[in-house]
Amino acid sequence: MKKILFLLTILYTINSFSQEIKYKEYSYTEFFKLIEEEKDSIFKLKNALIKFNSKTDARYVIKGKNVYEARDSTYEYRNDIVINKSIELDNVQFLTTNFSTDKGRFSGGALLDIHFKKSVLLNNISTLTMRYCRFDKAFQLDSRDCNVNKYLSDVFDAGIDISYSNFTNFNHQIYCANESRKLAVQYRDNNFKALNSDDRFFLTNNGISGLYFTENQVVYEGVFFGLFETNINIVTNNIFESGYIQKNISSLNYFQWSDNTYSSTVFLVPSPFSSKDIIGLKQFKKGISAYNGLMNYSLKATERYPIHLTNNRQEIVTKFLDSVRIHNEKAFREEMSLKSQFYSHFRSRYNTQVANKIYIELKNLETQRLKVEHDLNPGFRSYFKWKVNQFLKLFSDYGTEPSKAIVVSMYVILFFALIYLLFPNTWDRHGKNRVMN
């Protein structure tokens, strides 16, 4: 009996996987007509293809094949499509068609200039092009199983391209199996800005082919940015204005992270960078710090996890940066480990100037920690180590500036020469008068 049940289970599983998803098909005009005709306050749709129809969908055509060609700084909003319903879509794919005319290249099949006044929830979406859209409430893109769209990624180009749009409460989560890295995600020149204290910015990707996040403005009380198991990641020329910024980074094949603006310290959980990655240090005007150390301290101080859910987050962050990461040994080790990864990266790229700056930061932290250790266990040895570090900083920036050592030595020589001039030895009977004459 058990064998029969087991065989039936196997057959049922094979049959389930062998069945292809049956997609309903609509043009873009038909899709928005469905939303308009919906009587409920929530519009729901599952397993559908939204295809461009050249005869009816001229409203959804953008100039150019890619985002760079589509930018129009003089664009004026039409306000002809305003949606007052909540939208919930599951495995609904918005397919685009590229074509050319004597006026240039075009892409048909874009969500163009749509004003969403209620929440928008998009589940398991692999193909979406969006321009000049506005979201007054929550926008959530949640694809936890990209394999749902295996058929689509084999037939159509899988990609999410969202540009020149405005968001308030933003939540983007995509988790793809490692063997299906066909999905690329691009956010370019968007405005992410919280309107309420509860609004948040949360973006994480796992197992996609690439993330391109460029020239966006992100203004929130807290920002979470996660990148895991991804082939290509380009995060450049963005503005992040927030009291708390967290970035988790792991297993990236190529990472370009430069020319961004951060208004506060960036808390990181990175894996070691490769020599081919491009990392800019100047973007961290307020510095970097280890998230693991902050998380452990926050958990101990508030018994709440994670840190961005605590009510007194700013107070915790300030205290951690000012004292805890030096006084707490585990937090100090996390801090040194993080900065060492940046130091090793720039050394591997033979960028000694930047590597030396990070090395000085490492030694400054070490010097502060040596003072703490001396205060806890006073003694000649701890005092000597602390003072030697202070001397090395003054004398040669911990060995990174040999020329500074020469300058300091010259000052020392001149100082003692002056002493010798004013206070001659007893054997010099003429003293300073002989020297002066």
Image: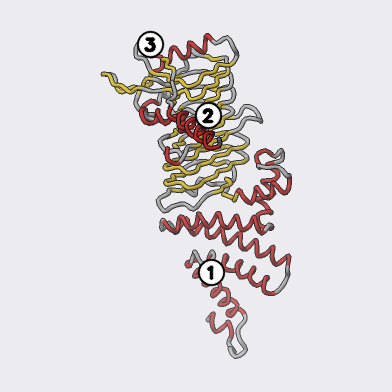
User: Is the residue 133 above or below the residue 270 in the image?
Assistant: above
Q: Which mark is residue 408?
A: 1
Disc 2: which residue: 141
Nearer the observer: mark 3 or 1; the answer is: 3
Kind of residue indicated by mark 3: Thr
The residues bearing labels 1 and 2 have C-alpha atoms spaced at a distance of 59 Å
Q: Decide which of 244, 412 is in the foreground and name it.
A: 244
Residue 382 visible, this orientation: yes
Expressed as whole percent of the image width and height from the top left, the position of residue 16 reads: 47, 28
Q: Residue at x 55, y 46 (%)?
A: 285
Is residue 187 in view from this perspective? no
Q: Type of residue at label 1? A: Val
Horizontal placement of 301 versus 402: left or right? right
Q: Could you say which disc has been placed on residue 354 in the image? A: none
Of the residues tagged 1 and 2, which is closer to the observer? Answer: 2
**Which corner quadrant holds the N terminus?**
top right
Neighbour tally class for label 3: few under 14, some 14-19, many 20 plus, Cα within 10 Å: few
Badge 1 density bin: few <14, some 14–19, many ≥20, Cα 10 Å? some
Q: How many marks?
A: 3
Is 107 or 197 nearer to us in this picture? Answer: 107
Residue where numbered disc 3 is placed: 56
Structural distance between the alpha carbons of marks 3 and 1: 78 Å
Residue 33: x percent and y percent? 48, 10
Snapshot quadrant of residue 386: bottom right
Q: Amino acid at mark 2?
A: Leu
Marks 3/1 in contact by CB < 8 Å: the verdict is no
Does 80 appear above or below 136?
above
* Cβ atoms at labels 2 and 3 below 8 Å apart: no
Question: How far, Cα to Cα, is label 2 from label 3?
Answer: 28 Å
Q: Earlier in the sequence, mark 2 or mark 3?
A: 3
What element does badge 1 sit on?
A: helix
Asked if residue 317 lies left or right of residue 187, the reply is right
